[in-house]
Amino acid sequence: MSSANAETRTALVRRARKINRELAVTYPDAHCELDFSTPFELLIATVLSAQTTDVRVNSVTPALFAAYPDAPALAVADPSQVEALIQPTGFFRAKTKSVIGLSQALTDRFGGDVPGTLADLVTLPGVGRKTANVVLGNAFDVPGITVDTHFNRLVRRWNWTENTDPDRIEADVAALFPKRDWTMLSHRVIWHGRRRCHARRPACGACPLARLCPSYGEGPTDPAEAAKLVRDGPRR
């Protein structure tokens, strides 16, 4: 860090890991909030989750996967029928093109199966490191860090990184934790971002990380006022 009060590397690592431990206590049930039963379902749901909520995605995927249960089925789908099913998620024409193209690539290059490596996943159309890490961590139990908008916001507030590029943020945060912690860390940070550490008015006065957070005070510090900002779950 460049400020006069910059932490040593050792102090930063210790504080980051204390934050993770506190998040583990606060959100013992943290998990991926996209509903899925197969790696294919999670991959498609993650693509659909762009610019919308997990709640909205979960409302459309049961019908989508009932009609197209695997990559070969979705690869030959009528785009207009897919558009009708996923319209509530927004940007449905572009997303339809993405999920059909993705399914065609899976069918042509991987026999319809979702590959279990980062190197293979990021070769698929529309799949970047964020989506790949969601799938790896939650469908294959391969540790990965998911840098979504919540994760990006919080780790910068905590001074874990000064970078804005998602790939560099991922690398900076990965260096602070053992690899085995990466997937659950991602869930906890995202849960905290959805429930307390909001973009506009973080619930600072109701935050268990107050003593560890260099950005404490960006939101209301009065406990009663802050408590009104705490959400039970993802925004609907």
Image (cartoon, rainbow, N blue to C red):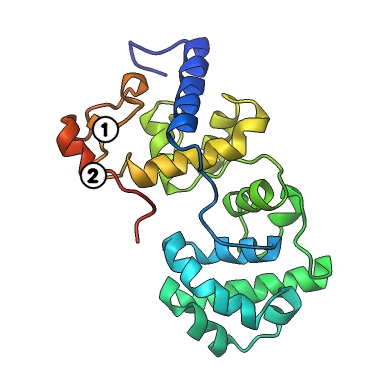
Q: Percent position (x, y) of residue 21?
A: 50, 25
Question: Quick one: SS at disc 2?
Answer: loop
Question: Quick one: SS at disc 1?
Answer: helix
Residue drawn at (34%, 16%) of the image: 3
For label 2, count other residues whose C-alpha is less than 10 Å away and answer few (under 14), some (14-19) or many (20+): many
Checking the image for residue 167, the label placed there is: none
Q: Which residue was labeled with disc 2?
A: 229
Q: Percent position (x, y) of residue 125?
A: 65, 65
Residue 183 lies in quadrant? top right
User: Does residue 51 appear anywhere in the picture?
Assistant: no
Residue drawn at (53%, 59%) of the image: 34
Q: Which residue was labeled with disc 1?
A: 206
**Which quarter of the image is occupied by the N terminus?**
top left
Tell me if residue 218 comes above or below residue 50 in the rendering. Answer: above
Q: Percent position (x, y) of residue 111?
A: 84, 69
**Residue at the farthest right position:** 111
Of residues 162 and 56, which is closer to you in this image? 56
Q: Percent position (x, y) of residue 142?
A: 71, 43
Of residues 91 and 38, which is closer to you in this image? 38
Q: Nearer the N terminus, badge 2 or badge 1?
A: 1
Tell me if residue 79 comes above or below residue 214 in the rendering. Answer: below
Q: How many marks?
A: 2
**Residue type at tag 1:** Ala
Of residues 234 and 46, which is closer to you in this image? 234
